[in-house]
Structure formats: C-alpha cells, structure tokens
Amino acid sequence: MFNTDSTGRRKFLKCGFSSFAGFSLLSRPFTAFTAQSVGGPEPGGWANGGTAGMRDIGSYPDPFINAAPQSVVSMPTCAMTQGPCYDRGIPEREDISEGKNGLPMRLGFRIVDEDYQPVTDADVDIWHCDADGIYSSETVPNVTFCTGDDPAALAARFFRGHRMTNADGVAWFNSCMPGWYGGRAVHIHATIKRSDHQGEEFLTTQFAFPQDFLEYLFNNHSDYRIHGQPRTSYEADFVFEMDSLDTYTFNIEQMSDGTLMAWTTIMIRSDLSDQLCKVGLDRPAGRRAQDSPIQRPF
C-alpha cells in the first residue's frame, strides 16, 4: 500500500488486500479509507475507458473530512514554472476529459489561507497531457511542442478546466491519469486565482504522483504500458526537487469502481505583496545541465 508516515515520506508496503495486485492504496494515516470492492477490468482492478468508468462516483469518500489542514500543510505552497502549454481560454467545468480514454481520475484540491481557513473564492485552473503525453489546444504558447500539430489535439481542449472552490475551499475535477513525454516526469499543472477566472494570480505550481504507483501503471495498464516507463524520473526532472517532492505529491487511493482518486491541500499566501517561494525556477537554461533535451513521444 501507499502510506505516508509522520515524516511525510511514502512507503510501498506489502499487505493482504486484494486491490492493486496484492497491494492496497492507502493515503495518509488520518484518511486511511479503503475501497471495499474493486470492479475495474485492468490488472489490479483499475478502470479504463475514461471518466465514463466512474460508476460509483456518488459513493466516493471525501478525503478532506478527517484531515485538518494543519496536519497536511505548514507553509504556503511554492511556485513552479507555468510551462509552454497553458491556455487561458478554457471552460469552467468538472469533467475535463472530453471523452478521452485513460485511467479515470477523481482529482481534488483544497485551498486554504495562511490561517488554515478555507479559501471559498479561489478559481482552480488545471491542465495536463493525455495518456500519450500530448496536450490539447491550438492557442497555447508553443503549439507544435504541446500538441505535435495533431489535428484532434489542436481542435480540442481536453484535460483543461477551471472551477471555483466551494464553502470548504475544495474544487473537484473528473479527469484521466496523465501520461509522460521525454524530459519531464509525470505531472499536473495548477494555477490559483482569487475572485474568478480573471482574478489575480496567487499561485502557479505543479504536482507529482507516487513513484511506485507510476511504475505499476506504466507496466500494466493497457492505456499506458504501450509507451513503457517514463524516460525522466522525478530525481532527473528539472522542475521538481527531491527534498520537497513529497510536499507536491498527490495522495492517492483506488475507488470501488477502479477509479484513481488523487487529492492535495494547497496553502496560498494571504496577500500578493507577500514573497512567493519558488521551486525549480532558478536553474540555468531551465533545466539541469545533465538532462537530455525534451522530446515528445509523437
């Protein structure tokens, strides 16, 4: 199972549950709920077919209920590079998949301020690539790099969307697990604004996934194994830093229908005049000297 001890480091521990091919995906100790049955067709009981596979979404547990913000975050979340594939003109919506295939993923963000109070007027804007490592949209800064000039990707806005937080400071999205492309580890981008989608930007950052889960996914799931293991590890990635990686790694758990639930808590600065900490933004030429050039999988 995936677990997080008091030092915040995830461990891959063998257990007797049937899910995940002999392993059970557990989150942090205070939200250690576990699916009672697994109905996905992929190895380990994982689902496929995109968000249409979220058959049990009405009964998914809320991982934030028993996890006080003070227990999971202690300082404002740091900024990371926006990257060349951001598109401002995206719709406000919960399901951002546009019918694309992949492991269905219920993705949750809780936004709190420096007093650990829920931010109820935050606009959470997320974007990521598809299972093949391709981004959508013809209006991103670097179209060829992001889409490979694929006509379907150019005409779409898949895996992009924004939502306002609710009274608990939470925004949920229905998506699919992203794939990878050469030069970057697997990641999801997020931008947090206040008031609305046109409001002032308080944070732009990125999030990762537990490495053991990725190894299993890219070895076994039919939508991901075709590309093999990611060429770039988190250790070699030019954005994430190993000493803070756990802070930016999603909690994950397998739902009863085989969907992946991933969630995190973000603390934003109370005022734009407050200095914003940064991760991975001060390296020459945007990447480590030993890193190979970014290569797309198309």
Image (cartoon, rainbow, N blue to C red):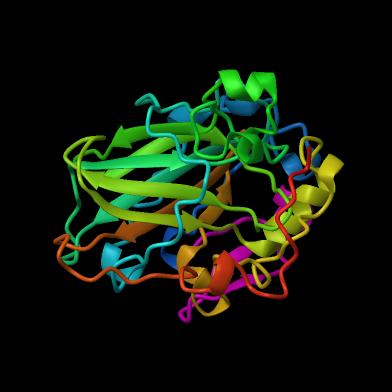
Q: Nearer the viewer, residue 110 or 22?
A: 110
Residue plotted at (42% across, 57% down): 205
Q: Nearer the viewer, residue 222 or 53?
A: 222
Residue 18 visible here: no
The vertical placement of 4 against 159, above or below, is below
Residue plotted at (51% across, 25% down): 157
Q: Position of residue 87 (x, y in %)?
A: 44, 34
Residue plotted at (30% across, 48% down): 192
The vertical placement of 90 against 129, above or below, is above
Position of 266 compared to 194: left or right? Answer: right
- Residue stretch rendered in magenta on the structure: 1-28
Secondary structure that dominates the magenta span: loop
Q: Position of residue 62 (x, y in %)?
A: 39, 45
Q: Nearer the viewer, residue 69 or 240?
A: 240
Q: Nearer the viewer, residue 17 or 291?
A: 291
- Magenta run includes residue 29: no
Position of 229 compared to 240: left or right? Answer: right
Position of 220 compared to 211: left or right? Answer: right
